[in-house]
Image (cartoon, helix red, strand yellow):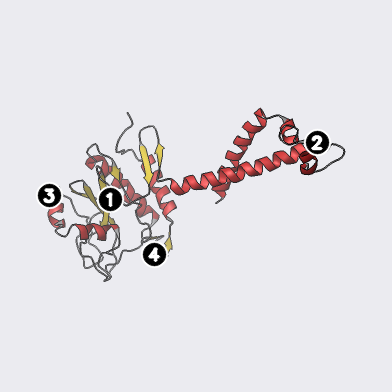
Amino acid sequence: MIDFIKKSVAAAFAAVTVIFTFVSESFFAGHEWITQELLNQCKWISGLLAEEVNIVISRLACFLLVWVATSAAYALFLALRRWITIQGENYSIRVEYGNILKKRKCKRVINFDECFTTHVGDKTADINPESICGQYISAHPGLAMQKLIDEANIAPARAKSRYQQKTKYDSGTIVPNGDDLLMAFVKLDEKGKGRFFTRDEYLQCLDLLWRELENHYSEKDVCVPILGAGTTSFDGGSGASISQQDLLNMMIWSYKLSSHKIKAIS
């Protein structure tokens, strides 16, 4: 909200600066836009220095009107905006609102758990059917995950998962499935529930992800969801969560600082 107010006030100041530059003071005094009879009724005050004071008050009123107009226009712009592009020396990031599963002509990152679980259901160890992963698995009922892992020659992590000592993969590891890049992400506890990430683990996952994407993007754009939004807690099991905006900021800065870029700007 504070950012919105700052930007709308800045836009209003810019607009009124142009107005005050090209519109004469007599306009704000009232001589050029109303009759003398209406002027006498509409002037803010009368008496000594009345004209100068009326000009100041009229300009303040003008600023308030412009501020209301620019605030309304900016709010409408934010409501209708679907994406924003962040460009740097050797990268271009487009933050977009939408459903990643409906994206086409790009590589899509779909985040699984560390064991690449494919069973969708409502039990603790099952994949949530409403999650991106759950929707993806439901849309691909014949998904042969182990075959994809074997074909990609993906090495498992050294340690086993805490859930039933299953084979697990480092968070950020990619398994290609056509244009879909299936990623090992959340860790599992003894009951098969996605456990807490620490911020360091999250950043390590992102670092591996950028390295993996550099090898798999095939000269195409890559779509990545906001990883951990709504389901992942942080700080070593304290139960604290991080907002989607903060997660997005962490992903953007991690990518900016990474030496592994998907596509350089020509």
Amino acid type for the residue under numbered disc 2: Glu
- Label 2 Cα neighbours within 10 Å, binned few <14 / some 14-19 / many ≥20: some
**Mark toward the viewer: 3 or 1:** 1
Reading the image, the residue beneath label 4 is: 237
Amino acid type for the residue under numbered disc 4: Gly
Q: CA distance from mark 3 to mark 4?
A: 35 Å
Instruction: Choose the circle earlier in sequence order: 2 or 4.
Output: 2
Q: Quadrant of residue 56?
A: top right
Instruction: Choose the circle earlier in sequence order: 3 or 4.
Output: 3
Instruction: Choose the circle earlier in sequence order: 1 or 2.
Output: 2
- Label 3 Cα neighbours within 10 Å, binned few <14 / some 14-19 / many ≥20: few
- Label 4 Cα neighbours within 10 Å, binned few <14 / some 14-19 / many ≥20: few
Reading the image, the residue beneath label 1 is: 102
Instruction: Choose the circle earlier in sequence order: 3 or 1.
Output: 1
Instruction: Choose the circle earlier in sequence order: 1 or 4.
Output: 1
Circle on res. 151:
3
**Mark toward the viewer: 3 or 4:** 3
Q: Quadrant of the C terminus?
A: top left
Reading the image, the residue beneath label 2 is: 51
